[in-house]
Image (spheres, coloured by chain):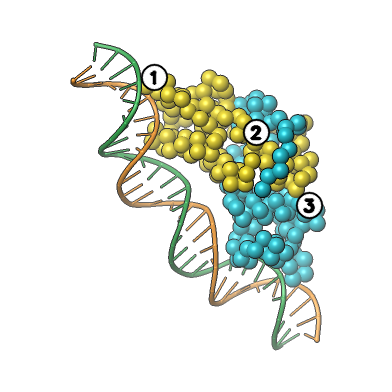
Chain colours: A cyan, B yellow, C orange, D green
Amino acid sequence: MEKTSAILALSALAHDVRLDTFRALAQAGDDGLLAGEMARALSINPTTLSNNLKILSHAGLIHARREGRGIRYFVMAEEMRALLGYLTEDCCGGRPELCAPLAAQGTEKTT
Amino acid sequence: MEKTSAILALSALAHDVRLDTFRALAQAGDDGLLAGEMARALSINPTTLSNNLKILSHAGLIHARREGRGIRYFVMAEEMRALLGYLTEDCCGGRPELCAPLAAQGTEKTT
DNA sequence: TCCATATTTCATGAATAGATGAAGTATAGG
DNA sequence: CCTATACTTCATCTATTCATGAAATATGGA
């Protein structure tokens, strides 16, 4: 992954609504979610959501497909993997172990 | 890790100078780097660098220690690990395998 | 004490991001 | 076709971020 793509993805995720949205889509997995479902579920103004979905799409983190009157969004796991790979491999000074003991590590519940 | 901390860290990293700085510090490891060394090495205006170092510090990704006339900065690996953990565990819908095959994965050289 | 060095804080202006109502586009169904 | 639904795009305003010169602060040494 290139640095510019990484920065694009990082800034896409660094936002309350977008992070919530991304998480909801990740949870939904291959089923994806309709824009309207997300707007209702997360109580977001449809226009605001649409703008933020566009930013996530542009970063390559999600993609969309029309479905009847609605538009269904899906997470792009590959891009997220690439980002995590970039952060661990490239940003941790070639010593991934410094920053990436993701295998084990305590799994606390967060919100 | 809490969502607000994650957003703070993500936006701290989502910036050209700050990402470069963070990478340089990660490479330096426990030796850390003086602010001046980084400014010279990366050709960054000292004021600009200082502002960006403050942002990284505030996000908990680095910390500083005075050393004579200079100030030496160090990466906070723990916070970076927490961020990566948050992204994989919390954002990938409780199905980390979706986004975190960091163990294997092709290690291409990036810039 | 006085000065040079190293870095930060302050102040300011320019650029970018963010939210949202109104208007536009696409689709389904009568 | 006509209308309702589901979204997006446009236009606009506000808020935040960014970069940087000038001034302030801290330290070391003569």
**Picture quadrant where residue D23 is located:** top left
Image quadrant for the C terminus of chain B?
Answer: top right
- Asked if one can make out residue B110 in the rendered structure from this viewpoint, the answer is no
Q: Amino acid at mark 2?
A: Arg
| Residue designated by label 3 | A29
How many other residues sit within 10 Å of disc 2, few (<14), some (14-19) or many (≥20)?
A: many
Q: Nearer the viewer, mark 2 or mark 3?
A: 2
Q: Judge whether D6 appears above or below A13 on screen.
A: below
Q: Determine the secondary structure under disc 1.
A: loop
Q: Determine the secondary structure under disc 2.
A: helix
Q: Which mark is residue B68?
A: 1
Q: To which chain does the residue with label 3 belong?
A: A
| Residue designated by label 2 | B81
CA distance for labels 2 and 3: 25 Å
Q: Is circle 3 on the same chain as circle 1?
A: no
Q: Amino acid at mark 3?
A: Gly
- Residue at horizontal 51%, vertical 30%? B63
Q: To which chain does the residue with label 1 belong?
A: B
